[in-house]
Image: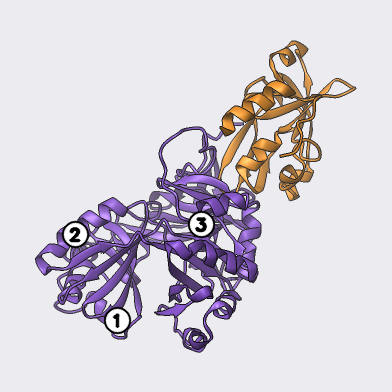
Chain colours: A purple, B orange
């Protein structure tokens, strides 16, 4: 057995080399629970605790939790922070008017390429918080610091936080049960893409955000590192199933959410990555990359990101060639969808009516359907999928 | 990790071979291999009647995350394939050394079996891989 065609990430068979990897504060807890650990962007992370597919179904039907402490939390301080974010982000920070509200955005370079995608939280005019990807940490911090300088904004990484995502139809109820009584009602009323501070079990100070990366309702919780294991254990005792990054990947792809590095990077614009909805061309706002985006829009965007579904048996995977009437494209994220029981993918293909689309799988042209994504919502197939 | 049955021979690439009473060589992947791959979702089986060479790719197993070639431990003709895997590829996860067999070969050169690892040598290989 050999793995010449496995996905671009080395999530399997990664145990044979000895590169120094970083560990989250929950590392020993994962290992004690029998997790299969892999190197993920320089971090030693759980890929699953047994069956990735069962973990996937647990999140779709009940509640699961993910250690996402590898993600990078950055606090921004200073009176001109909003001005700075107007310049840094392709989405408009002016959509955030209420304390605790969050916004998803791309951070672009001058050519309109995507440096990273992130979530920004608004606390007050002098304090915002970014959560950026782990694999892009150094690059992001350097870029943000450089851009922040003229605005006098202080850029402060917060490695003192661990982060646990609790996701699924029963996730919120299970988290609420663990909160201090005085906080429950307030956190229960928290709207989507909003966050607030709350007290967890044993008085643990938490930052609870109603966000996620699975397409299910739930919370992403920032917790000071010394309390992360206690929080994790309390959630497990409440019946929240530990889930690995494998399930996180199939859940987010079913939910139609991009993965940085696989679905977009500096070589593509948000127009070509299905992220036009995150770009705000509001009048008079000079954000980095705007000129390039407007030029590309005027000239015609050459490629489009589409969803694919394959009815035949097999699995769509990153890097497979996609054949269309307008030329070749390629699979970006591809997987077997546990909810649908068939393969789904994002692909970037030449713009225009693609005709009958096929994917080259080991030299065989397999027909696929182009569909609107998300593929799955509320635990069920979306219309047309 | 289940015990490695002592009657099996192995390729370094984690396929097992079992010589049966009628001389057929039944082939699958080890329990270690299935646990490395994770949940299997698809198995591409060879055609019955296909002739295969030792060490050549004969089948493909796909888990959620990875596709892997399955090499034949011996040369010969494929005489049986495990049709059950078409609907239930997870059988390999559940019983890699038994019900999860993949194909059976009528060996043309039994000498090739001597090239394979015995169960102890394979166990040692897995041990070294894990540390």
Task: Judge whether A64 appears above or below A126 on screen.
Answer: above
Q: Residue furthest left?
A: A150
Secondary structure, mark 1, is loop
Residue drawn at x 61%, y 71% as measured from the top left: A379
Residue drawn at x 66%, y 46% as measured from the top left: B42
Which dot marks residue A145?
2
Task: Judge whether A332 appears above or below A14 on screen.
Answer: below
Q: Check disc 2: other Cα within 10 Å, few if <14, some if 14-19, many if 20+.
A: some
Secondary structure, mark 3, is helix
Label located before the other in sequence (2 or 3): 2
Residue B72, picture quadrant: top right
Asked if residue B21 lies left or right of residue A168, the reply is: right
Asked if residue B25 lies left or right of residue A101, the reply is: right
Residue drawn at x 56%, y 54% as measured from the top left: A29
Label located before the other in sequence (2 or 1): 1
Q: Residue furthest top?
A: B111
Residue B118 placed where, x, y %?
73, 20
Along the line of sight, the residue nearer the viewer: B109 or A30:
A30
Mark 1 sits on what residue? A96
Where's the C terminus of chain A, which quadrant? bottom right
Which dot marks residue A249?
3
* Total marks in image: 3
Mark 2–mark 3 Cα distance, whole angstroms, equals: 30 Å
Along the line of sight, the residue nearer the viewer: A318 or A18:
A18
Q: Check disc 1: other Cα within 10 Å, few if <14, some if 14-19, many if 20+.
A: some
Residue drawn at x 14%, y 71% as measured from the top left: A286
Mark 3–mark 1 Cα distance, whole angstroms, equals: 28 Å
Residue A148 placed where, x, y %?
16, 64
Label located before the other in sequence (3 or 1): 1
Asked if residue A12 lies left or right of residue B39, the reply is: left
Q: Residue furthest right?
A: B21
């Amino acid at each position: 057995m050999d793995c010449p065609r496995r996905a671009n990430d080395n999530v399997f068979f990664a145990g044979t080399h000895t590169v120094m990897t970083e560990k989250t504060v929950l590392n020993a807890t994962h290992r004690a629970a029998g997790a299969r650990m892999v190197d993920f962007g320089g971090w030693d992370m759980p890929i699953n605790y047994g069956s990735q597919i069962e973990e996937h179904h647990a999140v779709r039907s009940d509640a699961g939790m993910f250690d996402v402490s590898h993600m990078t939390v950055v606090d921004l301080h200073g009176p001109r922070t909003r001005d700075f974010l107007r310049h840094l982000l392709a989405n408009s920070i002016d959509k955030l008017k209420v304390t605790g509200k969050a916004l998803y955005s791309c951070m672009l370079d001058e050519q309109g390429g995507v440096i990273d995608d992130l979530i920004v939280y608004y606390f007050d005019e002098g304090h915002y918080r970014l959560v950026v990807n782990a694999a892009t940490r150094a690059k992001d911090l350097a870029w943000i610091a450089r851009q922040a300088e003229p605005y006098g904004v202080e850029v402060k990484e917060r490695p003192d936080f661990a982060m646990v995502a609790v996701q699924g139809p029963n996730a919120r109820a299970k988290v609420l049960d663990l909160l201090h009584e005085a906080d429950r009602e307030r956190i229960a009323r928290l709207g989507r893409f909003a966050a607030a501070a709350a007290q967890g079990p044993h008085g643990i100070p938490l930052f609870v955000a109603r966000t996620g990366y699975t397409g299910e309702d739930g919370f992403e919780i920032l917790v000071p590192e010394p309390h992360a294991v206690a929080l994790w254990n309390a959630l497990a005792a409440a019946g929240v199933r530990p889930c690995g990054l494998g399930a996180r990947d199939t859940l987010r792809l079913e939910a139609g959410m991009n993965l940085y590095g696989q679905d977009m990077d500096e070589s593509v614009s948000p127009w070509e990555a299905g992220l036009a909805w995150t770009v705000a061309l509001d009048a008079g706002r000079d954000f980095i990359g705007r000129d390039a985006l407007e030029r590309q829009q005027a000239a015609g965007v050459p490629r489009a990101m589409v969803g694919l579904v394959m009815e035949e048996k097999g699995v769509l995977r990153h890097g497979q060639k996609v054949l269309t009437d307008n030329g070749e494209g390629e699979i970006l994220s591809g997987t077997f969808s546990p909810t649908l029981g068939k393969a789904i993918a994002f692909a970037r293909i030449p713009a225009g009516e693609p005709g009958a689309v096929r994917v080259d799988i080991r030299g065989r042209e397999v027909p696929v359907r182009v569909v609107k994504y998300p593929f799955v919502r509320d635990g069920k197939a979306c219309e047309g999928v | 990790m289940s015990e490695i049955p002592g009657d099996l021979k192995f390729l370094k690439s984690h396929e097992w071979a079992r010589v049966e009473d009628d001389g057929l060589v039944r082939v699958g992947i080890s329990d270690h291999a299935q646990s490395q791959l994770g949940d299997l979702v698809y198995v591409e089986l060879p055609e019955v009647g296909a002739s295969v060479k030792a060490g050549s790719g004969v089948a493909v197993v796909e888990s959620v995350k990875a596709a892997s070639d399955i090499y034949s431990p011996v040369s010969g003709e494929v005489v049986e394939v495990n049709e059950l895997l078409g609907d239930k590829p997870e059988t390999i996860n559940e019983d890699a050394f038994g019900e999860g067999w993949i194909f059976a070969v009528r060996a043309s050169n039994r000498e090739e079996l001597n090239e394979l690892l015995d169960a102890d040598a394979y166990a040692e290989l897995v041990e070294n891989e894990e540390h």
